[in-house]
Amino acid sequence: MHFDATGKVSLDQIYTQPDPRPYFSSLRALDYCIPEVAKPHFAKLIQEYQATQGVAVPTVLDIGCSYGVNAALLKYGLTMNELYQHYSDPADHDRDALLARDRELACTRDRFLDTRFIGFDSSQPALSYARSAEFIDDAVHADLERADPTERQRTQLAEADLVISTGCVGYVTHKTVARVATAHGERRPWMAHFVLRMFPYDPVAERLTALGYETDLMEGMFRQRRFASAEEQSLVLDTLAAEGVDPEGLESEGWLYAQLFVSRPRRAGVPAKKDEK
Ligand SMILES: C[S@@+](CC[C@H](N)C(=O)[O-])C[C@H]1O[C@@H](n2cnc3c(N)ncnc32)[C@H](O)[C@@H]1O
């Protein structure tokens, strides 16, 4: 088992496979559940956006969308258990057959939320799968930790009404979030990020404040997944201790926990000023 600098087990190899089976089989073993836990909170925010901003079909940008997990849950009302079951089917499917099955799954379900989804990830194979499965409607392949978006990417990012993420802050920082927030130039998308407690959110919130946002820490501690091993738990507890986060009754019990941060432009409904930095 390989651990990254933060003490978390490295799962990088499952993010870049041609199809999602390694992703779901590895994460199922860890009871990875944050997209399911996040679903009602994202749904509530999207519905609030529809009602208050008068946008019937908002565009949602999912940072670190991977194989289109949040889109599958929010557009089609699928559950993580269904996806875990779906991708563990023992039948010997090749990628094309899997994709055909996914498209069938999507079109046999009623729409859960009327949304258009843009998936954004640094993994081209995951994005390509999510797009072909028709879970996401458009894809942005970029690493905005390293560079500004291209003009084409900026145009795509600028379409976002809302920006969401699960399991991605930590891999991405204030750099990516700020580049997404400012893609439009004037209109700021609403944001909702589920962030592991081991990753300080202050740098992101401070950057968003400078861009005209107000950030709320929502009530609740949200289970993300089980620790992969006692060693991972011990390493993460060290990271939490260094950040001054008390793990008692939470990470000490064997699960990684996230918190939900919601950011809206300070005067909701009024475009933030272009030069408000
Ligand atoms: C733990 S997975 C979460 C996937 C999905 N959101 C979920 O909850 O199932 C983290 C994702 O972040 C992506 N990622 C890592 N670094 C990134 C970066 N710099 N920019 C965009 N995506 C990144 C990975 O490729 C991976 O798909």
Image: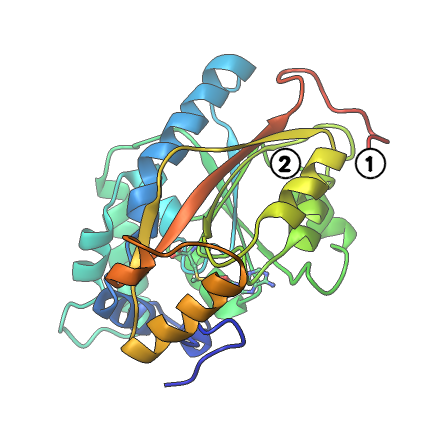
In this rendering, the label closer to the viewer, 2 or 1: 1
The kind of residue on which mark 2 rests is: Glu
204 up-or-down from 5: above or below: above
Indicate left or right for 208 with 69 as reference: right
Q: Which mark is residue 258?
A: none
Q: 42 or 128: which is nearer to us? A: 42
Kind of residue sitting beneath label 1:
Lys
Q: Tell me the quadrant of the picture where the C terminus can be found.
A: top right
- Mark 2 vs ligand 1: CB below 8 Å: no
Label 1 belongs to which residue? 277
Q: Residue furthest bottom?
A: 1
Give the percent coordinates (x, y) of residue 259.
43, 44
Residue under label 2:
159
Name above or below for residue 15 compared with residue 164.
below
First in residue order: circle 2 vs circle 1: 2
Give the residue displayed 77% in from the left and 56% down from the top.
148
Q: Quadrant of the N terminus?
A: bottom left
Residue 163 location, x and y as percent? 55, 40
